[in-house]
Amino acid sequence: MTTLRQRMTEDMQIRNLSVHTQVTYKLQVSLFARYFNKSPELLGPEEIRAYQIYLTNERKLATGSILVVTSALRFLYKVTLKKDWHFDDIIPAPKKPQTLPVVLSPKEVLQFLDSIANVKHRAILSCCYGAGLRISEAVRLTAPAIDSSRMVIRVEQGKGQKDRYVMLSPRLLEILRAWWLRERPKHWLFPGNLPDLHISRHAVNEACQKAHRLCRIPKPITPHSLRHAFAVHLLASGTDIRKIQLLLGHRSLTTTARYLRIATSKVCSTTSPLDLLPSPR
């Protein structure tokens, strides 16, 4: 595995895949090889099929997790090992269910944020809602990225390694200023416990779950729930969907358009035909 692992790493580096993607792909290939106790170079379509059946029927992994394994194996055999296969047949990808996120109301967002006692955690999660940031983007904010003169936040190297600008609301600016004046962070706006490192996503997720228990909102809540709420609340207030796409950093408008199915002001404001029937005597 040593030589093959090195070749695969170099192939991913040449294509400038993110560090997170590189680590994930190498882990999945390693688990695949360990399952058969052989190098992937010695394994073929039958072993790949057997492994997918194992993940689906025995491990009962979620579709998203199996898709990650599929992407890793496709990269290994198509790019690194240069197999001339029809990959849709040899390494098929499972059909992903089309689900809609559960969205918090503005009142619930306020209730949730008010239940966060830690000032740093409340500031980070306020960024997720106030600017629609992913948790990975919020934890990597720096002080210079907060441009109060233009009232924008510069998101550097977000998902897909893309920079973008998002709005900086006056209320969020007050929250961030209060945090900065309290701690005076040097480089990272939200430093972690170790010097020169930003706070981890895991730490923020734990803080989010603690606040979820305290606020007693029955809906599931994650940091990404606040990003969903950001998009839906903007849509409900009449913001153009193209603007929302740019703010969220979506590559495709189709991804943003799914929020049209969630916004009750767009979908559920239509009168039900039941209410149009004559009143019974």
Image (tube, rainbow, N blue to C red):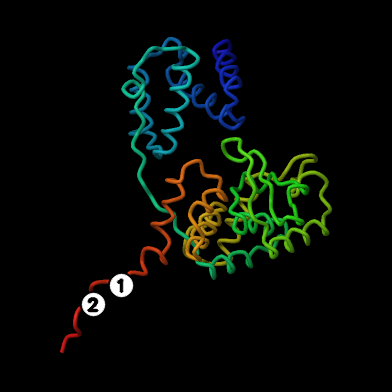
Q: Determine whether 254 is above or below 273 in the image.
A: above
| Tag 1 secondary structure | loop
Q: Name the residue under label 2.
A: 276
Residue at 47 percent of width and 12 percent of height: 81
Quarter holding the C terminus is: bottom left
Q: Determine whether 206 is above or below 25 in the image.
A: below
Q: Residue 98 carries which label?
A: none
Q: Which amino acid does label 2 sit on?
A: Leu
When asked about the image quadrant of residue 129, the answer is bottom right
Marks 2,1: beta carbons within 8 A: yes
| Left/right of residue 212 with respect to residue 49 in the rendered view | right
Q: Along the polypeptide, which appears first: circle 2 or circle 1?
A: 1
The picture places residue 266, in percent across and down from the top left corner, at 40, 64
CA separation in Å, label 2 and label 1: 8 Å
Residue at 25 percent of width and 77 percent of height: 275
Q: Name the residue under label 1.
A: 271
